Image (tube, rainbow, N blue to C red):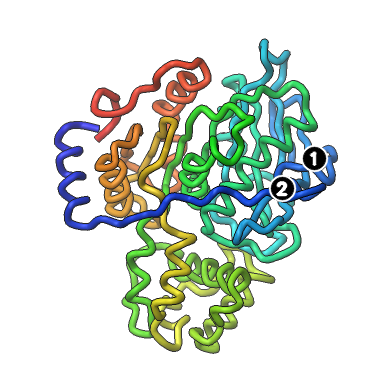
Amino acid sequence: MSSRLRRFLLAASTAATVVAGAAAPAAAATGNEAPGSVTHVQDLPADRWLPGIAKASLLTYWSQGPQDAPMLSTGVLYLPEGNAPAGGWPVVSYAHGTVGVADQCAPSSNPPLDRTVRSFGHWLSQGYAVVATDYVGLGTPGVHPYLDGRSAAHSVIDIVRAARSTEPSLSDKWVAMGQSQGGQATMFTARLATEYAPELDYRGAVATGVPSNIENLLPLGGPAFPKLPLKGTTVYIANVLDGLRAARPDLDVDSYLTPLGKTILDDVEHDLCYSDARTKYADVSIGQLLSRPLDATIVGAARDILTVPTSGYDRPIFIGQGLQDIDVPAPLTLKLAADLALNGVDFAFHTYPTDHLGTVPASEKDSTPFVAALFAGEEPCTGSSCSGSS
């Protein structure tokens, strides 16, 4: 970051600081439910392969969901072509963006999107294996706890364990990477990785389009919530409420919903993936979901799952943000960067003149050498000396 931006971010942080508590240690499961334990492995169907790979496997494995309870997840392992280097293929554990919460939306159940083919192909061409979790409850029993950062982090970490138990050519060296919902998952992963899986050699993280500071909007939640000039926000919030409804039945989330709100939550849980839900409910505001204001109990529960930690990281982090992003507006990420800087976190912050989905390809000129340095055991460029930081 430039000195000017750092001064601005520190000033912004002083004006509005969010306190994020440190995560509690993961509860250990026993028997065959231990995190990372594989229950099934098979070749990925041909229509879901990527160009230029030597092997693609579909894994079903145990992880931990809300309240650290055991839950199953699925995910994919891709191996690059060629011979593994000494010590095995370094691993990129990729956290996907929002696809929805219904089981049929799981990425491993569908042919890869063009942007996934391009992005994964880039990292495979660098000589890394790629593992990509679907997250718990997305295509597996239970409801996917959308934007429950701790649950998502467990899925991202445990697929590295699962993949290494089935593929001997993988190194224990790995980095976390993700965009949008996956950017938030990556930040939680970066906070938890070394304490949750000390047997792995976690090196650092790349997070782009990170949803953060959403919790600061929660006290406004109610029928009078203003219509936001953003894309897909109502469906994002419906996904959050649906996951919270499943994870915390004691909160009685339905009692806060209008009949339309209940219909939308049921639709996203069972029938509609994100893009279809966004189209169907494009004219519905967040206020139309809610029959009464959110009280302190439900606001507190939502904060617990949503709030991106701003301290406690022990490896370098790369954060990329599109300045034209209307899914995750730049001011929210600027505040995240301010809080991280205030807490002395080692991170590189880059902005790009692009939208939400454009941030991933735009950032690769900076994230590629960053990841290479991590795997090489070198200090990646962070702070004001990095080119491309704003």
Residue beneath the point at 57% across and 77% down: 264
Q: Amino acid at mark 2?
A: Ser
Residue beneath the point at 61% across and 70% down: 268
Q: Work out whether residue 193 or residue 243 is closer to the camera in this orientation and state it.
A: 193
- The quadrant in which residue 364 appears is top left
Q: Left or right: 272 with respect to 368? A: right
In this rendering, is residue 40 above or below 251?
above
Rendered location of residue 79, percent (x, y)? 71, 27
Q: How many marks?
A: 2
Q: For the residue carrying disc 2, how many other residues have a C-alpha within 10 Å: few (<14), some (14-19), or many (20+)?
A: many
In the rendered image, the quadrant that contains the C terminus is top left
Q: Of the numbered discs in the image, which one, if any, rests on residue 44?
A: 1
In the rendered image, the quadrant that contains the N terminus is top left
User: How many angstroms separate mark 1 from mark 2 (CA)?
Assistant: 8 Å
Q: Is residue 197 visible?
A: yes
Residue beneath the point at 41% across and 80% down: 294
Q: Work out whether residue 339 or residue 178 is closer to the camera in this orientation and state it.
A: 339
In this rendering, is residue 325 above or below 351?
below
Residue at the spot of label 2: 108
- The quadrant in which residue 67 appears is bottom right
Q: Secondary structure at mark 1?
A: loop
Mark with earlier residue (1, 2):
1
Q: Of the numbered discs in the image, which one, if any, rests on residue 160?
A: none
Rendered location of residue 74, percent (x, y)? 73, 48
